[in-house]
Amino acid sequence: MSLYIRDPKVNDLADELMRHLGSKTKTEAVRYALESALKQANEKPSLKERVRKYQEEIAALGPKNPNFDEKAFMDEMWEY
């Protein structure tokens, strides 16, 4: 099966990658690029894992004080 690239910019990128990698064909270069992109995507933490990280950081700050008056705090900071 042959590889036909219609977009001139994509074709130029494939040529550039082919030269950079020293591959014999564009197909090899495109395969390498796609495999690299998939590997990178699979190594990226999931949204659930990223959210959990932030939740843990927030939980480490301690419980929220229900009696804390944020308006009074801000007024005091701004000397009102």
Image (cartoon, grey):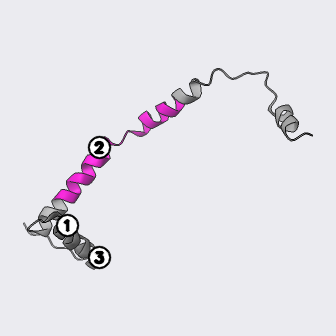
Q: Amino acid at mark 3?
A: Lys
At label 1, counting other C-alpha atoms closer than 10 Å, the crowd grade (few under 14, some 14-19, many 20 or more) is: few
Marked residue nearer the N-terminal end (2 or 3):
3
Taking the spot 62% from the left edge, 25% from the top edge, the residue there is 61
- Residue 28: x and y, percent? 12, 62
The quarter in which the N terminus is drawn is bottom left
Q: Which mark is residue 42?
A: 2
Going by the image, does 62 lie left or right of 33?
Answer: right
- Quarter of the figure with residue 73: top right
Q: Amino acid at mark 2?
A: Asn
Name the residue that disc number 1 marks. 20
Residue 77 position (above or below residue 23): above
Going by the image, does 50 lie left or right of 9?
Answer: right
Q: Which mark is residue 9?
A: 3
Q: Secondary structure at mark 1?
A: helix
Taking the spot 26% from the left edge, 76% from the top edge, the residue there is 7
Taking the spot 45% from the left edge, 37% from the top edge, the residue there is 50
Q: Secondary structure at mark 2?
A: helix
